[in-house]
Amino acid sequence: MIPTTYLTELAAYTRDRIMKVVVNNTVEITSFYIRQVSDHTVELEYMIPHGSVVTAELIELKSATDVVVSSNAVYIPITSDTIIKQKMKVSEVTV
């Protein structure tokens, strides 16, 4: 069993690697309202500006060197400035 403190350290490492959000491979967002770790969960909050895309269909979290940390296929119509709240939980997988 992996201790919760170590899972939290891994979540903090992951948070520190995430430097931007890329929407539909075209729109880069580098400003976060929230970018924190709570327990062993990375919590992000950012805005997709109205007019940047009609519909968000792919959201990628990337490092400063464009390495993908997370990739999610979504369907989010952007009819106004849209705040996205995203969480990633670091957990042990048992087989």
Image (tube, grey):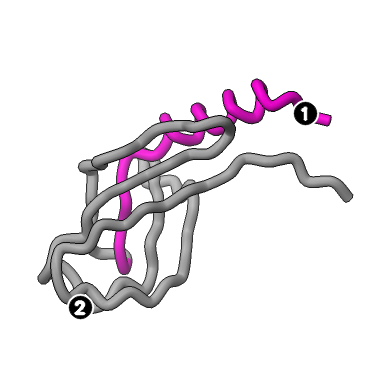
* Relative side of 63 to 2, left or right: left
Q: Secondary structure at mark 2?
A: loop
Q: Nearer the viewer, residue 20 or 1?
A: 1
Amino acid marked by disc 1? Ile
Quadrant position of residue 39: top right
Image quadrant occupied by the N terminus: top right
Q: Which residue is mark 1?
A: 2
Taking the image as shown, residue 95 lies to the left or right of residue 88, namely: right
Q: For the residue carrying disc 1, how many other residues have a C-alpha within 10 Å: few (<14), some (14-19), or many (20+)?
A: few
Drawn side of residue 23 relative to residue 7, left or right? left
Q: Is residue 6 above or below residue 56?
A: above
Q: Is residue 11 magenta?
A: yes
In the image shown, does 88 or 61 lie closer to the viewer? 88
Element marked by disc 1: loop
Q: Which residues are magenta?
A: 1-24
In the displayed orientation, state which residue is furthest to the left. 51
Q: Quadrant of residue 48?
A: bottom left
Question: Is residue 47 placed above or below 3 in the rendered structure?
Answer: below
User: Residue placed at 32% from the left, 47% from the top?
Assistant: 45
Task: Tell me the residue that label 2 is attached to.
Answer: 54
Q: Amino acid at mark 2?
A: Val
Query: Which mark, residue 73?
Result: none
Q: Earlier in the sequence, mark 1 or mark 2?
A: 1
Residue 69 on image: x %, y %: 48, 47
Is 12 contained in the magenta span?
Answer: yes
Tell me if I can see residue 86 in this picture.
yes
The location of residue 79, given as percent across then percent down, is 17, 76
- Position above or below: 26 against 78: above
User: Residue at the front extreme?
Assistant: 39
Q: Could you say which is closer to the camera, residue 38 or residue 28? A: 38
Residue 7, percent from left and from top: 65, 30
